[in-house]
Amino acid sequence: MDFKRYIQFTRELQHAGFLSVPVIYKSLDGLSIEEAIENFVPHERRSIDYKHIDNQSLLEVRPIDNGVHLSYVHGGKELGVGNGTKAMQTLIKLCDKHGYDIELQTYSRDSIIDEAKGLFEFYRKLGFCIHQIDGWEDVVTEADLVDSDHLEGVPMKRSPNIA
């Protein structure tokens, strides 16, 4: 991964309203948000939490060879009103711009099968497909999945849509 390009990606994500936790702390210490964003350099391998300044929705991403890994997305202070979807749309738009894949694993933190299946469907509607990585080579379609797959977490990937 071109790390300079990844730094630019993180800056654009923050200019879209998703401030990294380190930038939030720097701004609380008196640095302007713009200065904090410009001085922020993410770690080459660690996840970074980003929090939207208006709706408090959350993204946690980390760089991978061909893009970003999404650890989680959360709708913020008001659930069920589309903030999580908007967060994903912002992430997808930036990843498309930078030619980045997005990889993730769907699962229910509470081990609720309907919730896990709902998350799988949510990401599928956003253009994600089953990522056929180690142990998942035989899983081609949703019909190949069983309940335990959903509970353990289905690896998914979205490749950039470059126009």
Image (cartoon, rainbow, N blue to C red):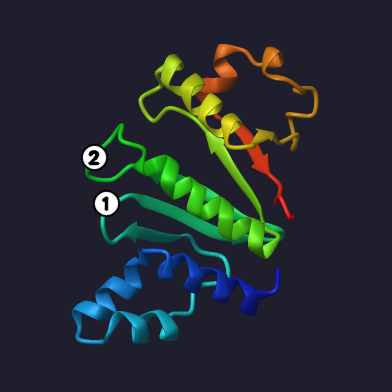
Quadrant location of the C terminus in the rendered image: bottom right
User: As rendered, which of 39 and 94 lies closer to the eye?
Assistant: 94
- Please tell me which residue is depicted at 27% across the width and 35% down the height of the picture: 79
Relative to 27, say whether 87 is above or below. above
Query: Is label 2 in a helix, a strand or a loop?
Result: loop
Q: Are marks 2 and 1 in contact (CB under 8 Å)?
A: yes
Q: Which residue is mark 1?
A: 55
Marks 2/1: CA distance?
7 Å
Q: Mark 1 belongs to which amino acid?
A: Asn
User: Which corner quadrant of the image does residue 150 belong to?
Assistant: top right
Q: Position of residue 115 (x, y in %)?
A: 42, 21
Q: Is residue 80 above or below residue 28?
A: above
Q: Which comes before the other along the chain, label 2 or label 1? A: 1
Q: Which residue is mark 2?
A: 78
Residue at coordinates 26% horizontally, 74% vertically from top-left?
25
| Three-letter amino acid code at the position of disc 2 | Glu
Instruction: Check disc 2: other Cα within 10 Å, few if <14, some if 14-19, many if 20+.
Output: few
